[in-house]
Image (cartoon, grey):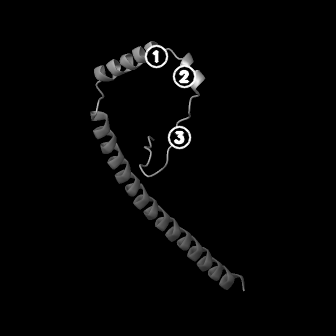
């Protein structure tokens, strides 16, 4: 699952680069890399229909999840009823058996 940063949460602060390390960097190479990344960003066409598909599937999941919970509750109720009937059958059998055996 994709999670976004909450806007009120603090993010990790950027580290400071010492001046001697800045002098060692090639400014032209960095600017070329920035231009390359900006051009790539301009060319990219994100498929926003994926978000709509995700929202649809999330709704479907929630609906199926609630349906599963309802079915599970019905199953549990039927299981309790079955257990009660088994107990009642055993009690009635034992009552009849005790009548026969005495």
Label 3 Cα neighbours within 10 Å, binned few <14 / some 14-19 / many ≥20: few
In the rendering, at what x and y percent does residue 93 appear?
61, 76
**Where residue 61 sits in the image (x, y, percent)?**
37, 48
Residue corresponding to mark 3: 13
| Image position, residue 29 (x, y; %) | 45, 13
**In the rendered image, which residue does mark 2 sit on?**
22
Question: How many badges with numbers are in the image?
Answer: 3
Q: Residue at x 31, y 34 (%)?
A: 50
**Label 1: how many Cα within 10 Å (few below 14, some 14–19, many 20+):** few
Q: Residue furthest right?
A: 102
Q: Secondary structure at mark 3?
A: loop
Residue in the picture at 29% in, 29% down: 47
Q: Of callouts 1 and 3, which one flags the residue occurring earlier in the amino acid sequence?
A: 3
- For the N terminus, the image quarter is top left
Using the rendered view, name the quadrant where residue 70 is placed.
Answer: bottom left
Q: Which label was assigned to residue 84?
A: none
Cα–Cα span, label 2 and label 1: 9 Å
- Residue of label 1: 27
Q: Is residue 60 above or below residue 50?
A: below
Secondary structure category for the residue under label 2: helix
Q: Could you tell me how far apart the alpha carbons at marks 1 and 3 are, in whole angstroms?
A: 23 Å
């Amino acid at each position: 699952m994709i999670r976004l940063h909450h806007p009120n949460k603090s993010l990790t602060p950027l580290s400071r680069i010492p001046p001697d390390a800045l002098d060692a960097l090639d400014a032209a190479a960095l600017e070329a890399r920035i231009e390359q990344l900006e051009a790539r960003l301009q060319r990219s066409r994100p498929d926003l229909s994926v978000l709509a598909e995700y929202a649809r599937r999330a709704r479907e999941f929630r609906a199926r999840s609630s349906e599963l919970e309802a079915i599970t509750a019905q199953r549990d109720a039927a299981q309790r009823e079955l257990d009660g009937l088994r107990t009642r059958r055993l009690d009635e059998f034992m009552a009849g058996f005790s009548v026969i055996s005495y």
